[in-house]
Image: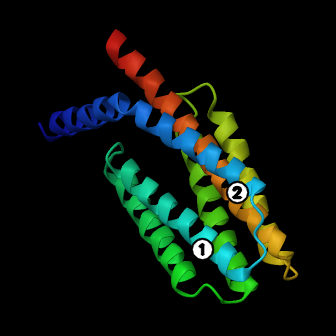
């Protein structure tokens, strides 16, 4: 009996998530537009770069909280923890805008590492369900490699931080689009079943 209740609850979560595919399509497009804007602006002060990173981290945290509503119990915890970590990092960057570049680079590196591990995990978990799982795998590997590059090769150059923040926004946009189309495909499968 408990197994039937669990299956029914999971199906409800899946159906509700599939109905919200368009939300992730919109957030993915917004992240891509934001990434394009980041690469076009001229950031020459430490405070401007810190504020930029703070906003990106807080928006990423809020985005993780959106994903809690469309996932099952185990993933809700992961999304909640990531959301809290991103919001804390964003608030720290906004409150302490004149900290050293190395601190901001460490925060960006940490962000990329967590995001890369998460994308790798999701790619392998959904391998049997989605044909394009390998694209998310590639993005996750690239994020992890970038995280180590950020940690080891900073040398106090302001432009690198802007590039890192742009890359974070770009990778976030790509993975949001993956999620949107995964949910849309799931909606189609549920409708035909």
Which image quadrant for residue 186? top left
At mark 2, the secondary structure is helix
Give above or below for 84 relative to 37: below
40, 70: nearer the viewer: 40
Seen in the image, is 115 located left or right of residue 144? left
Residue 54 location (% of width, % of height): 56, 72
Q: Mark 2, residues whose alpha carbon is within 10 Å: few (<14), some, or many (≥20)?
A: many
Mark 1 — residue? 51
Mark 2 — residue? 38
Residue 131 location (% of width, % of height): 61, 25
Seen in the image, is 162 located left or right of residue 126? right
102, 49: nearer the viewer: 49
Residue 41 location (% of width, % of height): 74, 59
CA separation, marks 2 and 1? Answer: 12 Å
At mark 1, the secondary structure is helix
Residue 171 location (% of width, % of height): 66, 49
Numbered label tally: 2
* Residue 193 in view (yes/no): no
50, 110: nearer the viewer: 50
Residue at position x 44%, y 64% in the image:
83
Colour style of the rendered protein structure: rainbow
Seen in the image, is 78 located left or right of residue 119? left
Q: Quadrant of the C terminus?
A: top left
Q: Mark 1, residues whose alpha carbon is within 10 Å: few (<14), some, or many (≥20)?
A: many
Residue at position x 52%, y 28% in the image:
181
Give above or below for 7 relative to 86: above
Residue at position x 21%, y 40% in the image:
6
* Residue 25 in view (yes/no): yes
Q: Quadrant of the N terminus?
A: top left
Which image quadrant for residue 115? bottom right
Question: Which of marks 1 and 2 precedes in the sequence?
Answer: 2
């Amino acid at each position: 009996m408990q197994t039937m209740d669990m299956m029914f609850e999971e199906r409800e979560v899946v159906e509700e998530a599939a109905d919200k595919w368009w939300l992730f399509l919109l957030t993915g497009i917004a992240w891509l537009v934001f990434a394009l804007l980041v690469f076009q602006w001229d950031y020459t002060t430490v405070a401007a770069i810190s504020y930029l990173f703070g906003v990106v981290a807080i928006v990423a945290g809020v985005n993780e909280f959106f994903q809690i509503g469309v996932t099952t119990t185990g993933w809700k915890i992961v999304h909640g923890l990531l959301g809290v970590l991103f919001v804390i990092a964003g608030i720290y960057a906004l409150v302490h805008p004149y900290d050293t570049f190395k601190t901001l680079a460490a925060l960006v590196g940490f962000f990329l590492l967590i995001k890369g591990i998460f994308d790798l995990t999701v790619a392998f978990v959904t391998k049997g369900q989605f044909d394009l799982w390998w694209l998310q795998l590639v993005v996750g590997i690239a994020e992890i490699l970038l995280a180590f590059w950020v940690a080891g090769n900073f040398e106090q150059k302001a432009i690198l931080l802007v590039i890192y923040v742009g890359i974070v926004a770009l990778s976030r946009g790509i993975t949001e689009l993956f999620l949107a189309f995964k949910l849309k495909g799931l909606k189609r499968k549920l409708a035909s079943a």
